[in-house]
């Protein structure tokens, strides 16, 4: 049975994916914690903080050959003792112009409940194809 917290996280992930597909910076911002950390899949670059991530996404959205990233959760485990959760899943990046997948792999994400919403505190990606 899916808990309310797990459902809320899955809904937030779907909103994040829609925002990436639509190049919607305003929709991404509230899903990221202020100090969110992202470790990229290929070169392990660390993008620290919501502001830095917003700048990175702005550059991605302006790229001549834009890649649309989709993160698909395989599992979401909600802590029974703290307002946190771990999401594990797979991701892919596809060309916005052709739809061809150009990279894919696995990811993990740590979520935290802040007030009535869940936000991403950390994500780690691994490129496997």
Image (cartoon, helix red, strand yellow):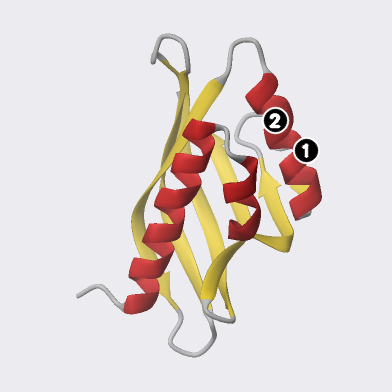
Quadrant of res 54? top right
Could you tell me residue 46's position as x and y percent?
76, 44
According to the image, label 1 marks what residue?
A: 55
- In the depicted structure, whether residue 117 falls above or below residue 59: below
> Which residue is at a point 53% across and 73% down the rendered structure image?
117
**Residue 128 visible in the picture:** no
Name the side, left or right, on which 118 lies relative to 76. right
Could you tell me residue 105's position as x and y percent?
45, 34
91 or 28: nearer the eye? 28
> Which residue is at a point 47% across and 16% down the rendered structure image?
95
Crowding at label 1, few (<14), some or many (≥20) Cα neighbours within 10 Å? few
Give the farthest residue toward the bottom: 81
Quarter of the picture containing the C terminus is top left
Quadrant of res 110? bottom right
Crowding at label 2, few (<14), some or many (≥20) Cα neighbours within 10 Å? few
**Residue 117 visible in the picture:** yes
Name the side, left or right, on which 116 lies relative to 98. right
Front position among marks 2 and 1: 1
Could you tell me residue 14's position as x and y percent?
40, 50
Cα separation, mark 2 vs mark 1, equals 18 Å
Quadrant of res 99? top left
Q: Earlier in the sequence, mark 2 or mark 1?
A: 2
Name the side, left or right, on which 9 lies relative to 114. left
For numbered disc 1, what is the local secondary structure? helix
23 or 108: nearer the eye? 23
> Which residue is at a point 52% across and 79% down the rendered structure image?
116
For numbered disc 2, what is the local secondary structure? loop
- In the depicted structure, whether residue 37 falls above or below residue 106: below
According to the image, label 2 marks what residue?
A: 43
> Which residue is at a point 68% across and 21% down the rendered structure image?
62
């Amino acid at each position: 049975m899916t808990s309310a917290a797990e459902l809320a996280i899955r809904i937030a992930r779907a909103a994040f994916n829609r925002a990436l597909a639509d190049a919607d910076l305003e929709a991404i911002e509230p899903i990221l914690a202020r100090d969110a950390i992202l470790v990229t899949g290929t070169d392990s670059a660390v993008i620290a903080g919501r502001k830095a991530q917003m700048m990175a996404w702005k550059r991605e959205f302006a790229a001549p050959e834009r890649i649309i990233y989709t993160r698909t959760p395989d599992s979401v485990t909600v802590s029974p003792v703290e307002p946190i959760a771990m999401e594990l899943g797979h991701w892919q990046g596809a060309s916005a112009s052709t739809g061809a997948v150009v990279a894919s792999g696995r990811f993990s994400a740590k979520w935290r409940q802040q007030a009535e919403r869940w936000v991403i505190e950390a994500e780690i990606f691994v490129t496997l194809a």
